[in-house]
Image (cartoon, helix red, strand yellow):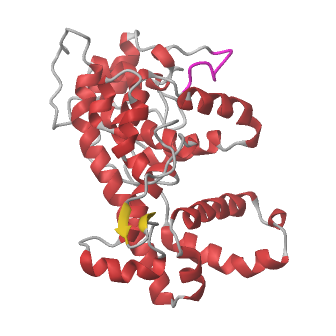
Amino acid sequence: MSLHGANKENQNIRSSGSSGKRKATRPPFEDFSKEFKQRRTDPLVHYGRHFGRSIRTFCRMQPLLRNCLGRTMQLERLPLTTLSCSEIREQAVYDNLLEMVPGLEEKLNTGSEEEVFYVAEMLTKGISSARSDDTKGLKSVIVDWITPPNGVLNPPIQRNIKTDRGYHHPATGRLLCPVSLDWERSDVREALASGDLTPSGDLWPRFLYKNGEYIEDDPWNGLLRSALLVKGYKHVFTSPSSVYKDGAVNKATRSSNARRHGMKSVTPASIAYIATQVRFALSSSAAFTRTDATSDSEYFYNLLIELLEDPEEQAEVQDLLTWWNQ
């Protein structure tokens, strides 16, 4: 699949004037208050939605802004290498945010504490609303995706209730089962269904792998290349209808979430986001929250982010991104 091609520069809205047509640009941050008077939702919420999907979905925005703003003067005098590894990662997330939102850097640097708090609040609202919308959307369609072609699920899975999913159903259980466990063993299935065996977020489920095939001696082989992930990615970033169109991602992105935000290629964090959403959709957990011990979603997401941003894994990560963007 690909966001290549259709994710060219945003097709800016053109307006007529006395000198002919000209490209309209995204409004700077200073114009947000004027825009807000004419719009139901603050534009910061709009940016927060895309930030959560493509950069960080489990992001504590208040500490992020506070820490990075406090670090600004330090970085004017000292190189980035003086920071710890965690501070460098945090700074990279902050830099991505500044690049995403026009005029935000100046506003944060000159704004009051109340204004900074408001920015964090609106961005957080956007992150949460996008995550909630995607969770709701995938909850239903995932049933169609895991149903055999021209077949049925036995027993049936309800589209709007999750109690019969997870390890309670053979179809979702097989996909969620960690690659280190043998789903074909009845004792394993029973232990997972009863809760006597509760896999933590650091055990990769089988649905992450292409055709569900895991090769112990080559753990990167097929990782994060499954058809289920591709469907999830298309559903969220292009359009729900593009899921069923082979090779149609480029065209679909012209009016998609990715297209509207000028997203030109798949990001590592966006893959981790979709993997986390698909994992939750397959599970029997009712609520997508930080504290849900059953799905362990935040831990799972952060581990994927850690893997995909690990400097020692970049050769494999680049190969993965090439696969997604081809």
In this rendering, position of residue 34 left or right of residue 19: left
In this rendering, position of residue 171 left or right of residue 153: right
Residue at x-position 35% and y-position 52%: 131
Against 151, residue 39 (above or below) is below
Is residue 109 shown in magenta?
no
Q: Position of residue 232 (x, y in %)?
A: 37, 33
Quarter of the rendering occupied by the C terminus: top right
In this rendering, position of residue 144 left or right of residue 93: left
Our reading of the magenta stretch's main secondary structure is loop
Q: Position of residue 46 (x, y in %)?
A: 37, 63
Viewer-side residue, 43 vs 62: 43
- The magenta-colored residue range is 216-223
Against 23, residue 67 (above or below) is below
Viewer-side residue, 259 vs 308: 259
Viewer-side residue, 2 vs 139: 2
Which picture quadrant has residue 173? Answer: top left
The answer, for residue 234, to whether it is visible in the render is yes
Residue at x-position 49% and y-position 31%: 2
